[in-house]
Amino acid sequence: MVIESCITNPKISLILVHEQDSLKGGCEFGDFFKVTPQKLIDEPYSLYRDIAIPLFSLKEYRDVSLKLILNKIVGSDPTLRESNVGYIRESIQRTLSQIARGGSRRSRS
């Protein structure tokens, strides 16, 4: 399984994000446990070991959520932490803002 190799690869950091708005595809977090294979929930994979970042619809809350995601991205990559983080943060923040506004959404086929 691809997800197993991602979970065990030290060069890949998974960031769990939980959409809260049902109009944007959000669901109860417990629903994930119903559809995730038990093998990925249990040790050694522990897919849900880290707390998922809630992604809210209300602009003020969504901005906070996006900043938490950004901090996770930068914090999980040593090269980002040691490089020109200001520029990278701004670039990622613009991308996340576009996604939040629906600017980079892809249609599902």
Image (cartoon, grey):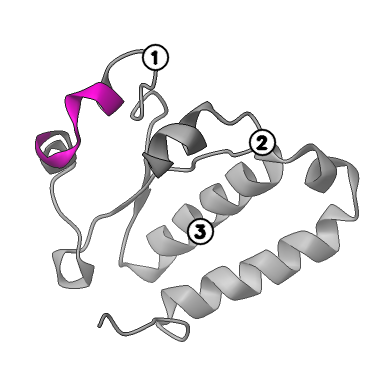
Percent across and percent down for residue 19 are: 28, 57
Question: Which dot marks residue 66?
Answer: 3
User: Disc 2 designates what residue?
Assistant: 11
Q: Is residue 83 above or below residue 102?
A: above
Magenta span: 34-40
Q: Secondary structure at mark 3?
A: helix
Q: Residue drawn 38% across and 31% down?
A: 51
The kind of residue on which mark 3 rests is Leu
Q: CA distance from mark 2 to mark 1?
A: 17 Å
Q: Earlier in the sequence, mark 3 or mark 2?
A: 2
Could you tell whether 26 is left or right of 60 in the image? Answer: left
User: Disc 1 designates what residue?
Assistant: 44
Q: Earlier in the sequence, mark 1 or mark 3?
A: 1
Q: Secondary structure at mark 2?
A: loop
Query: How many residues crowd around disc 3 within 10 Å: few (fewer than 14), some, or many (20 or more)?
Result: many
Residue depth check, mark 3 versus mark 2: number of the one nearer the observer? 2
* Quadrant including the N terminus: top left
Q: Is residue 100 above or below residue 36?
A: below
Percent across and percent down for residue 97 are: 53, 74
Percent across and percent down for residue 101 are: 43, 81
Instruction: Name the foreground residue: 70 vs 3.
Output: 3
Q: CA distance from mark 3 to mark 2?
A: 22 Å
